[in-house]
Structure formats: C-alpha cells, structure tokens
Image (spheres, rainbow, N blue to C red):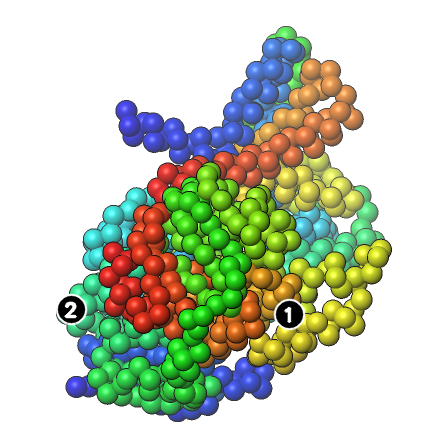
Amino acid sequence: MENILSVKGIKKSFGGVHALKGVDLEIKKGETHCLAGENGCGKSTIIKIISGFYKPDEGTVEVEGKDYPVMTPTDAIRAGIQVIYQDFSIFPNLTVIENLAFNQVLATGKKMVNKKEFRKIAEDAIAKINFDVDLNALVETLPVADKQLIAISRALLDNAKLIIMDEPTTALTKKEVRRLFEIIEDLKKNGITILFVSHKLDEVFEISDSITILRNGENVISCSTSEMTEEKFAFYMTGRNFDNKELVENKKTEHGEVVLETVNLSAEGYENISFKLHKGEILGITGQLGSGRTELSLSLFGLNKPTSGKIIIEGNKVNIKDVTTAEKLGIALVPEDRLTEGLFLSQSIIRNITVTRMDALSNKIGILNSKDVVRESAKWVEELGVATKNHEFPVGTLSGGNQQKVVLARWLANNPKVLILNGPTVGVDIGAKYDIHKLLRKLASEGMAIIVVSDDTAEVVATCDSAIVMHGGHVKGILENEDLNEAKLAEAAV
Amino acid sequence: MNTLKNKMNKYVKQTEFWVFLIILVLSLIIQGRSGAFFANNNLVDIARSMICPSIYAICALLAFVSTGPDVSFPLIAALSSYISIMIAYKTNFDGPWFVIFLVGMVFGALMGALNGFIIVKYKFPSLIVTLGTSSIFSGILLGAFEAERMDLPETLQRFGKLTLLAVKNEKTGLGSSLPMTFLILVVLYIIAYLILNYTLVGRGVYAIGGDEISAERAGFSVGKIRFGIFVINGMIAAIAGLSYSVMSMRYLPTEYAGGEMVVIAAIILGGTRLTGGVGTLKGCILGTLLLTMVTNSLILVGISVYWQKVFIGGIIIIGTAIPALQTYLNKKKKEVKAGEAA
C-alpha cells in the first residue's frame, strides 16, 4: 500500500536545543498509526512540522508522493492534513458556525463571508459525526466535550485525508473515549488515515494498526501493532525496563496498628462507609466516576462534611471540619488535578515544595530562613528524583510526572501519618508512574499509611495491599491479598 | 413565542442592551427634570459632539478586539493633521478638501505602520508600544515642528462651513447645526461594519483576538492582519484629527492629547472585552453616546461640570462591572446545573 505521508530525516532545534534529531515517519493510506513517546520526546514538534506550523531545519515532507519543500499551514490543509490539537484550536469568542467553517473557507482562498455557505459547511461538518449543537451559540458557552466534538467535526470536513489527533483522550471520560474510537473506526471505513498521538498503552493497542515510537527526538522503532507487546512498548518509550513483580513482591499482609478508621460514615456522594487503615498499609479506593470514591477521600481531608458516622484517628474520634484540622491531624491529600488544585505553576520548584512548611522554616517574627528553604527543597528534589536542572525553575516547565512529584514532595515535607492520593498518576507517563509507585511502597515500608484513590485498575493491583471497590456511593466489595487482581476488580466494579 | 423569548434572552445577555437601557433612563430623567433633552438643538449638539470620539472609537475597537489597547491615535491625529495642513500651506494648495484628508491619511498610515511593525515583529505589548510612539509623535509635533494654533487653509474652512442640517429651537431661540463631517462618520462606520462582518479579514480580526494560535492554524495571516489594523488605525486617526480641526475651524495642537482614555472607556462600556476578541461597532456608538450625553446634558439638570466627572467615573465603573457580573452569574448558573447533573 502506498504512503499517504512520508517524512524523512527531520531535524529541528530551538535555540540550540535539538528537539528532533532526524526523525522518519511513514504512514500508509487508510491505517490508524500511533505515534508514541514520553513527554518531551518531540511528538508535538513533528506534528507541527507536518501541519506546516514549524519549518524543519533539515529533512523532507511528502504527502501522497508530492514533496513539500516549504509547507505552510494552508498547504497542509489543502493537502488534506487536519490536526486536532489538545487545546482543540477553537475561537471561544465566535459562533459554532464560524469555528467550523473558517478552515475550509480560508483554504479556498475566498475573501468574502457568505453566511449561507458558512452555515452549510457547519451543518455538513456536524452531520458527519451526528453531533447535535446550536450552531449559533458562542463556543465559550459550551461544555468541554462539545468543544472537542467541534474540533473533530471540523477536521472531518470533505477534503481531510489524514487526521492527526494529539492526545485526544486526555480530557475525555471513558464513555467519551468509546465514542471517539467508534468515530475513528467509521473514519477508517471511509478511507481516512489517522495519526493517533498518545502514550496511553491500552488505547494504543486497541485502536492502532501500526506504531512509531520516539524518544529524545529520535526514532526508536516502527512496526505493526501485532508485533508489539506491552513490555516492549514501555521499554521503547522510556529506555528502561519495568518490573511490577518487584512492587507486588514488596506487598505486605501484616500491618501495624490502626491509624485511621471510619464507622458508618455518610456524606454527600456516599453512604455507610466503614474501613480500617493500618500503619504501613496501602489501601486502594476504586470505582467508576460517580461511585463516591473522590467524595470519600475529600471527607477525610475536611472538604466534604460528613452527615453521620465517625472518623477515628489513632483511637480518638475526630471532627475534621476543615483542611487546617486535617493537616494538624497528620493527614495529607494530593489532589487529582494537580495543575489547578495543587501547584503554583509560575512559581519556582523551591517555593512550591516549601509552601506548606512556611511556619517551620521561618523564625519567630515570620521571616523565612532562605538557607533552610533551599536545603529542604533540595532534599526532596533529590529524594523523589525530580528531573530538573535548577530548582529555581517554575514548576510549569516540568513534565506531568515531575509536577506530580513536586506535589508529593510538598505534602511529604509535612511528614504526614496518612497520605491520600487522588489519581496519583493521571496524565503521567510510564517512567514517572513507575517511580511514583515505587516511592509509595517505600513510604509505606517506612510506616506511612497510604490511601490511593484511582480508577486505574492496573495501578491499584500493582500498588495496593487491599482495595475497597465502590459503586453508587456504597462499598461493593473489599479485595485483599491474592483476591486483589484486575479480573476481580473489574467484576466488583460493575 | 419561544423564539421571541430566546431572542429576548440573547439581547439581555448583551452589554449593548444594558447600555441602551441606561441611555434611555438617563435621557428620560434629564428630559423630565429640564424638559430640554429632546429639544432639536440638544439632539443635534450631541450628534455633533459624538463625531470625533466615535471615529476614534473605531481605532480603539480594532486594536482592543485584535491585539490590545492602542493609545496613540490622538497623537497620530494631531501630528498627521499638522503635517497635511502645513503641506497644504507650503504648496498653496486650493483644490478639494479631501486631498488634504488623503495626505493626512498617508502620514497617519506611516505612523500606524511604525506601531504595527514593532508590535508584530517584536511581539511587544501594544499598550507599551503605543504609549512610546505617542510620546515620540508628541515630541516631534511640539518640539521639532513647534506646532502652534493656526488657521486652516481656505479649502478646509469652506468644508467646515458646510452644514448637513441646521435647527433652531422655537422656545429658547438656540440654534445648532450638524457639520458635513457627520457624513464621514457615517461612511466610516458603514465601511467598518461591512469589512468586520462580511469579509474574512474582518472575521480574522475577531479570530486572532479570540485565539491567536488557533487563528494561525486555521490559516489567517495573523501578522498581516495585525499590521494592517494599526496602519488603518493611523489612517482613521488622521481622518478624526482633520475632522476635529475642520469642526473647530482652527488647528489646535494641544487639544488632542488625553482623548484616548474617554474613548477607551466608551468602548469598554459598549461591551468591548479588555482581553480581546469581543466588541461591536454598535457598542462603540452606544458607549460614546452615553458618555457624550453625560458631558453634554447633565448641565441641563443643573449638575455642575465637576460633578460630571464623578458621574462619568461612576458610569465607567458600573458599565464595566456589568460584563463581569454577567460572567459571574453565568458561572454560578453552570455550577448549579453541574451540581444537578451529578
């Protein structure tokens, strides 16, 4: 089969940093090709080159056998290349019609606005995926899922031959991912080629026909999906071997005394939850979205007031009325959305790590001892292996996994008795995920009691000693020891 | 019935609607207290006072929607008017008035191009760039050229004496006339309306204000559009500057500076969003009308000139608070909805 896209020897550097060091990418017509790699491997850069947004320093881009020495965004659209960016590339201040029609009208080189034509283009676009939306609505008033559907239907306009989806599932729920995959299958039937950019293992294996993996701006491997295994995939992406056996072997069945206990605890989102958490134990709380797992974890941190029942910490009944109380009791919570809830992205790593330790690091009149601050921060950066050259850099410059480590460091700096992590590895790449899991096990072996709230069953199996499965606000089952496996978890969650 | 309700809902959500409401209430109050607001001479006076600020408002709108604040238009107006008038004097020009306007527009375009070049090429914030160029233009005008008050060339004087409409109030005997420059305003607004709504470049102005990167990806020439906007702003400023001297029958170099703030306040009142992407010509006119009414007509109800400033300040704050309040309420509504769904 002939190639729709053939990219050879692409090099690109930014201010002396080599983002791409000679990348090749061959995509056959009609296939779903996956481009994988960890954050910072050059995935986004190569997409921007294919779509004409960046000019490569070296290398060639061929679309359907035609060479494009200088590709502009308009050229790319004319050649049938459409990109669905992670930010959807929409105009929040304009109507759905204009958002849908601009690309196509601009590609034809028209100068005037024909409202009828705009509307027709928009209607055609949404009809392709049976998307129902008020065409005259301003896009900023629509929910996120609709914004993505606008981006997708726009990309599906007539002349699209190759659709590049940049991590399309990041903001989607499982149900929406299913819908997206159905759409991709439909497109494939219509002969449209998809370049699916992702680092999520299960998705890649489910949807793609062939895989290209990049690491540090270089090709690692290109092969058909059937020749790839999960272990190889993780190895090619990170250059490291991961062995979950080590994690599993370190699990403990014997624990210390009870640190935290709930008795018939009820609040908004869940009812009658009783469990015991021991010293040195990692307890999983799992269940689907809306099962009450998040609400339960928030109650333990003073953010969702219980309506009845008891919380007992080290034998004493406590009333966790707010976050300050929770912190005083030695409870720490690492939030799910680390970007909006946990970090000051524009501030330095040092400040982010030490922000909850201000009292301990300052003298009587409240002036910070800057040497102590730096020492404290350096200690955690080293301990958790945060990959950075300088901890004066803003946290926003770090990858997702490293940002998550900074959040962890902040809470660990307070030396909590109970550490609650909500979706600790959501959006984190494989290498950092493994590091975080190993770290949790190490903390537990040092006596910390840990609660992992997650819907990632593989994660729960790999890290937790026991797991509570929730559904509709109730406990569906508690799995322990050898009962804690993916099959039983899936069974219990429904 | 339902569609009518939807339409009403849509209107109520627009800032322009609220400004219109304020204008209506305020005019009725002034009329009730003084009986002179709807007098023909007062209405013509207001229309006359609106001409220059409304033309400036187009500059402010284009800049705000696409890029950010432009505060240089009053000084571009002053300097380009001065140069074109001086050229007319030096060449003993006595042809049609619009030739002087065209010469002014060329110089205005050059000054705007300087703004556009720096903003597009070096990606500097437009506020800083236009503040800087304003200062440069002011220095050239008052320092290098030593511009002073002067009479206008014959052809401009003749143009200034033409009136579109003259009225006389029967009761008070006060008269007022609407100059031909009003037609310039009307023509500019029609052109601007057509370009902004019916050409892709015009929609591009909104698109790059909404999301610059998306606009570039969609295929808009972001740099060209932005540069073009500042060139056009220079030209429009030149037209406003010459219209101002035509209406006052003299060239007054020091009367221009400082005009930008009221104009910007007016368009923000009219619903232009400070963060870009949103703003209409309708809003420009309504915002300017409201502020002109306050400056012109409060005196009719016996409010002193000093209190006018307090009034203007109050209106600006309330006016800009309305969109913020709407965003807040919408967010609340959404949260309630999300809560119900969960």
Task: Using the image, name the chain to which the residue with label 2 belongs.
Answer: A
| Residue position marked by numbered label 2 in the rendering | A190
Residue under the point 21% across and 84% down:
A226
Residue under the point 47% across and 59% down:
A277
Mark 2 vs mark 1: which is more N-terminal?
Answer: 2
Residue A306 drawn at (x, y percent)? 48, 42
Q: Cβ–Cβ below 8 Å for labels 2 and 1?
A: no
Tell me if B193 is positioned left or right of B45 in this view.
Answer: left
Whether B244 is drawn above or below B293: the answer is below
| Residue position marked by numbered label 1 in the rendering | A349
Q: Name which residue type carries label 2.
A: Asn
In this rendered view, identify the residue nearer to me: A145 or A290. Answer: A290
Is residue B199 visible to us here? no
User: Which marked residue is nearer to the observer: mark 2 or mark 1?
Assistant: 1
Q: Name which residue type carries label 1.
A: Ile
Task: Using the image, name the chain to which the residue with label 1 belongs.
Answer: A
For the N terminus of chain A, the image quarter is bottom left
In this rendered view, identify the residue nearer to me: B190 or B24. Answer: B24
Secondary structure category for the residue under label 1: helix
For the C terminus of chain A, the image quarter is bottom left
Tell me if B88 is positioned left or right of A314 in this view.
Answer: right
Residue B33 drawn at (x, y percent)? 64, 11
Residue under the point 49% across and 84% down:
A19
Whether A359 is drawn above or below A244: the answer is above
Residue under the point 46% across and 39% down:
A308
Asked where in the image residue B181 lies, by quadrant, the reply is top right
Q: Residues within 10 Å of mark 2 (few under 14, many from 20)?
A: few
